[in-house]
Image (spheres, helix red, strand yellow):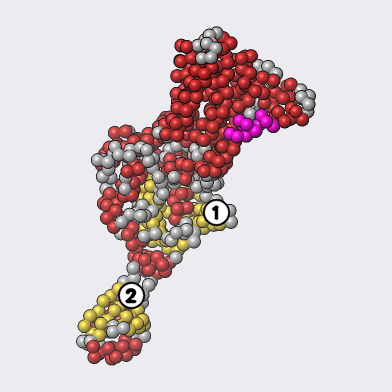
Amino acid sequence: MIRFEGTSKSFGSIEALAPLDLEIRDGEWLGVFGRNGSGKTTLLRLLVGLSQPTSGHIRIDGTIPGPEDWRAFRRSLGFMPERVSLFDNLSGEKTLRYFARLKQVDQAEVMPILEKVGLAEAARRKTSEYSKGMRQRLNLAQALLGDPKFLVLDEPIEGLDAHGVRDFFELLKAVTGRTVVFSSHRLPLISRVVDRICILSQGKVNALGTEDELYEKVNLPVRIVIHPRRDKAQALTAAVNQLDFASLVSQNGRLVVSVAQKDKLQFLSELLSLGPEMHDIRIEEPSLEEVLLETT
Amino acid sequence: MKRPDAVWAIARKELSERLRNRWIWTVSVLVLAATIAIAFFSATPVGVVGAHGGGAILASILNLAVYLVPLLALVMGAGAIIDEKRRGLLDLVLTYPVSSGEYFLGTFIGYALALGIALVTSFVPTGIVLSATTGVDIQQYALLVVLVLALGTSFLALSFLISILSRDPARGVATSVLVWILAVFVFDLVLVGILVGFGGQIPETAFGVMLLLNPTDVFRLIAFTWVGSAASPLGLATVSPPFPAAMLVSVLVLWAVVPLWLSHRLFQKRLAMDKLI
């Protein structure tokens, strides 16, 4: 288990990360979200020991790590940085062999990992000939070397198209039983796979919890789109306006009503009791993008 | 140093990357062509055979080395470490069980090996030709090659310091070229100016100590000690007091060790402060 205890990071007078208390549980998948400059990368750099905290500390399995503890921790760590330009002159296989030597991982592991990420056939090609998606997979492959129990992925799907994102998640499905920390600003895509979500804004944790807990905390209203019958629009508008827990947002041949989550069922019940005034209803729950916007 | 295997792995990777650089091989071939040309033109007109003629050839080759070896070493190391930082590789490597000291040492060894291979390629074939066709003493020539390697290593260490100070590969190259001009051309001109300014009334030892402040002059002093009176092209080295060879060699080694130590300290400090670039 990893704990941030009052951990902060400043660069001169700029506070990149405000004092933070955060616990990353063994085996959980944590998504760290926020806009550019929100402190995601700073948090991850602290987590892997690339930066030292300005105040507070990080505790790994109950210990504040010294240099040798970091070395031991890094044997069980896989890190996939956001921006890395791997060696253009080396093949994918040679690149991975180099990292295997650094991690003291058996060279026999190299080809199976390249197979796992779908690069076995391109193993002997120079990485300069790789596509963006292939480079991303090679980047993931180096992070998977040595079967790390702790994976830190900084913006792993940045720059990938829809197919690339799908392939990346397919690969990750094979990763089980590890603690995984993602950072991304594409919340809806990552939220499917993480257990908990941490939303950062201007270096501060704005929200932390499961997807459901975030919805509950933010409590964004549900939107209900009503398509009235042609001759019933006025009557229906008047009826909806009488329901004091609902607010009519717009009217453009249809009624868009904003209703608090707690009033959703009551509103629907009363709406249906109005009789056959409408020919369709659509319920739009707030998206995670809206949750992210609301909290940052 | 806990992991010599990691140091070696990094050194091998750096060596492999450096040797794929065409620029290094271009310069090496040019140096080789120049040394062979010197050997040819020095020997042909007088039909040199014997120690005196061999010494003159060696002095000419040493003079060529004074200009080109520092340039090769400085430009080669100008982007060292900083370039990896910019590419994100340094950060990635440091998330592995490798200390920053091991990374630094491995990188320097890799660069030094690549420079060594380039220099051996440049100078050794000429030595073989010279030993077969002229009176050049092959042992003396081998010492020359060792001396050239030491000169290259000291300038490589300087280039690491420049690279970390400049924080940018392009700025590093520009600064390296400036340092090369200062070391190879300007420094001696300044010394000559001082000598003239004082009407030649500078104590010999003080003048000699000033020469030690420039690794190219230390190189020249050692070469002068070895090659002797035939080395008249070696400039100011010929007017220095006769320092013991061991002391001169130690100073040249210090010219490699001190900049390397300083660059390592600076590297560690800036790394800790997230201010490497």
x 29%, y 57%: residue: A162
Give the residue at x 42% y 69%: A294
The correct choice, above or below, for A291 with respect to B108 in the image is below
Q: Is residue B170 visible?
A: yes
Which corner quadrant of the image does residue B8 belong to?
A: top left
B195 or A41, nearer to the observer: B195
Asked if residue B187 is among those painted magenta in the image, a careful observer would answer yes
Q: Where residue A276 appears, x then y in whole percent?
A: 21, 87
Q: Main secondary structure of the magenta part?
A: helix
- Within-10-Å neighbours for mark 1: few <14, some 14–19, many 20+: some
Q: Quadrant of residue B207?
A: top right
Q: Is residue A28 above or below residue B176?
A: below
Residue B14 got which mark? none
The reply, left or right, for residue B150 in relation to residue A75 is right
> Which residues, given as a range, are shown in magenta?
B180-190
Q: Which type of secondary structure does the marked residue at label 2 adopt?
A: strand
- Whichever of callouts 2 and 1 sits on the residue coming sooner in the sequence is 1
Give percent across and percent down for residue B162.
56, 38
Q: Chain of mark 2?
A: A
Q: Residue at x 78, y 26 (%)?
A: B199
The three-letter amino acid code for the residue at tag 1 is Ser
Say which element carries label 1: strand
Left or right, A77 with reference to B122:
left
Q: Is the same chain shared between marks 2 and 1?
A: yes
> Badge 1 is on which residue?
A10
The chain under label 1 reads A
Residue on which disc 2 sits? A222
Q: How many marks?
A: 2
